[in-house]
Image: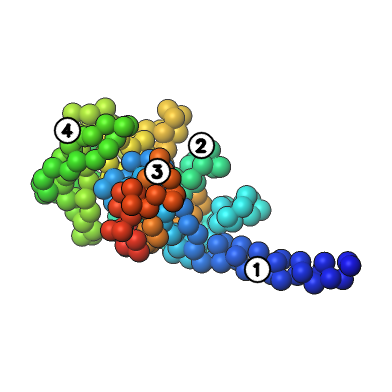
Amino acid sequence: MLKKLAGELVPLAVAVAVVLVVRTVAAEPYNVPTPSMVPTLMVGDTLVASKYAYGYSEFSMPIGKLPSFKGRVLERAPERGDVIVFRLPRDTSTTYVKRVIGLPGDRLQMREGRLYINDELVPRQDAGAFTTELNGRTETLHRYVETLPGGHAHDILEMSDGGLRDDTAVYEVPPDHYFMMGDNRDNSLDSRVSAAGGGVGYVPVENLVGRAEIILFSRDPDVSIWNVIAWPHAFTRFFTRVG
């Protein structure tokens, strides 16, 4: 009886080990629960993040974490504009996804809703209105295409240029840290708010988990998983690249 049981458990254990290795070394899925990255990521998106993109840290394990160590193994630096899954510095049990806007040594500031990097205004181009659901209400926001230093262009949303975090002090990104922002600028708790103030603050390099690569599928979390027809974006966002 024990021999038979052991024979049945061995393949299961091997399968679990393979899954853990893949999710630790290669890629892992993450669900998007908030609208902070709209329009790039929608609430209900399930994305895959590549673990190998930036190397591995103590937070690379999908369950718990590896023994504590500083920095990364096989490290490769993120590029400005990458969408990154990372562990929240003030609570490493929480996972966030934002875009890298500031690199180590950068100076950043928001002035009247416009982003400045190293004292240079980041250009944006008007892309018309964008209508979405926010906090149970239909909102029409301003959509822009923002082009970061280095040439990476992506969509951002603004309710106005006079919001709570549209005028800030100058942020100086420390060595081995990154500055993250949400594409939905007036609906994102990000590095513009310090960790002490309940925000993200600067993100240490060891907190990076992986680069968001592709959206597997998307569904409204308030709609039954069986009611596929009612999922917004269900058929238009499957297997789309995150950019």
**Residue 161: image tag:** 4
Q: Name the residue under label 1.
A: 15
Find disc 3 in the rendering and name its residue.
223
Whether the residues at callouts 1 and 2 have beta carbons within 8 Å, the answer is no
Per the rendering, the mark at residue 90 is 2
Q: Position of residue 194 (x, y in %)?
A: 41, 33
In the image, what residue occupies the spot 15% across and 40% down? 142
> Is residue 177 something that shows in the picture?
no
| Camera-side residue of 240 and 67 | 240
* Camera-nearest residue between 30 and 211: 30
Q: Is mark 3 on a helix, strand or loop?
A: loop
Counting from the top left corner in percent of width and height, residue 13 is at: 71, 66
| Spatial separation of the CA atoms under disc 2 and disc 3 | 32 Å
Q: Is residue 206 left or right of residue 158?
A: right
Residue drawn at 33 percent across, 48 percent down: 230
Query: Which badge, 1 or 3, comes first in the chain's sequence?
Result: 1
